Amino acid sequence: MKAFQNTNTHSKVLYLFIFCLAGLFLAGSLVMVINGFWSEQWMVSAWGLRVSSAIQMALMFFLPAYTLVVWSDHKPLSYFGLQHSDSFLDLALIAFLILLVSMPFITLLAQLNQLLVLPNSLSGVETWMRNLETSAEETTNLLLTGTSVWDYLGNLIFVGVFAAVAEEFFFRGALQQLLVKLFKSNHTGVWMTAFIFSLMHLQFYGFLPRIILGVILGYLFVWSKNLWIPILIHFLNNALVVTFSYFFKENSVYQSIENIPVTPTFIITGLLSLGLMVYLLKVYQTKARVAQMQVEQ
C-alpha cells in the first residue's frame, strides 16, 4: 500500500500522532473487552497491568510506526535499520558503556528534577503533575511487587522487551527520522524526539533524566543507522530497573541510592559522568562512521 508515498514530511508527523491516538483508543477498548471475560480484580493485578501495557505498546507505538513506514512505500528492514551489521557487537558494547557511565549524571538530574517547585500561581498545575506522578508510581510499584521468578521474567518481557521494541520503533525509528528530515538537522531531530519521548510518559518529575536517556538513544541510532542498538540499550536500561527492584528492593544501600541527597560530591560525580558520557558518544560516533564507510566501499 502506498497511501503516503507522496505525502510531505509535516503531514507524516501529524499522521503518526493521529495513528498513535487511535491506537491508544483501540487499546483501551480492547482492554475493556478483555475485562469482560476476566474479573475486574485480575485486570488491576500485576499480570493484568502487564498484558494491558503490552496491548497499549503494540497499538499505540509499534503499529503506527510500522504502518506509516509501509504506507510510505519504504521497506521496513532498511528504513528502520534492522539488517545484519558486522559492527553491531562493537557498537553495542560501547553503547552499553555509555549507559553505565551516564547513570550518575541521570540520577543527579532525577534528584534535581524532584526539587523543582512551580510558582504559587501554578499550584494547580503542580498538584495535577504530582497526582499523575503518584498514579504512575503506584502502577510501577504494582508491576514490580511480584516475588516469584515468573513475576521477574514477566517484567523482563513486558516492561523490558515490549516497551523497548515498541517505543524505539515509534520514537527513534519513525518520529526521529521524520524530524531529522523535516529540520535537516540530526541534532534538532534527536533533541526534539527526546523531548516528546519524555513528555509522552506523563511523569514530569522524571522529565529531565528521561530526556537525556532519549538523547542517548537518539544519537545511538542516528550515527549507527541500526535500530537494534537503541532497542538493546533501552531494554537493558529497563531490565536493570526490574532486576535491581526484584533482587535488592529491600536492601538499604539500594534504597539510599534512590534517595541520595544532592551534595557537592554528588554534583562533581554527576559532572564527571557527563564528561565520560560525551567522550564515549564521540568514540561511538567515530566507530559508527568508520563502519558506515566500510559498508559503502
Image (cartoon, helix red, strand yellow):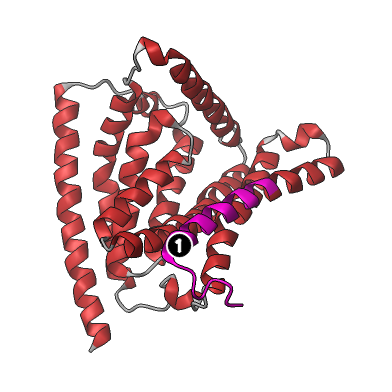
The residue drawn where x is 43% and y is 73% is: 79
Specify the principal SS of the magenta part: helix
Residue 209 in the image: state x and y as whole percent.
33, 37
The answer to whether 28 is drawn above or below residue 216 in the figure is above
x, y percentage for residue 182?
A: 35, 61
Task: Name the side, left or right, on which 11 lies relative to 277.
Answer: right
Q: Does the magenta-highlighted stretch encompass residue 19?
A: yes
Please tell me which residue is depicted at 45% across the width and 62% down the height of the picture. Answer: 174
* Residue that badge 1 annotates: 174
Residue at 80%, 46% in the rendered image: 34
Residue 278 lies, in percent from the top left, at 17, 51
Type of amino acid at the residue the image marks with label 1:
Ala
Range of residues picked out in magenta:
1-25
Closer to us: 288 or 13: 13
Q: Nearer the viewer, residue 67 or 218?
A: 67
Quadrant that contains the N terminus: bottom right
Left or right? Give the position of 134 relative to 25: left
Name the residue: 54% across, 33% down: 140
In magenta stretch: residue 192: no
Q: Is residue 178 visible?
A: yes
Q: In the rendering, at what x and y percent does residue 232 appear?
A: 41, 59
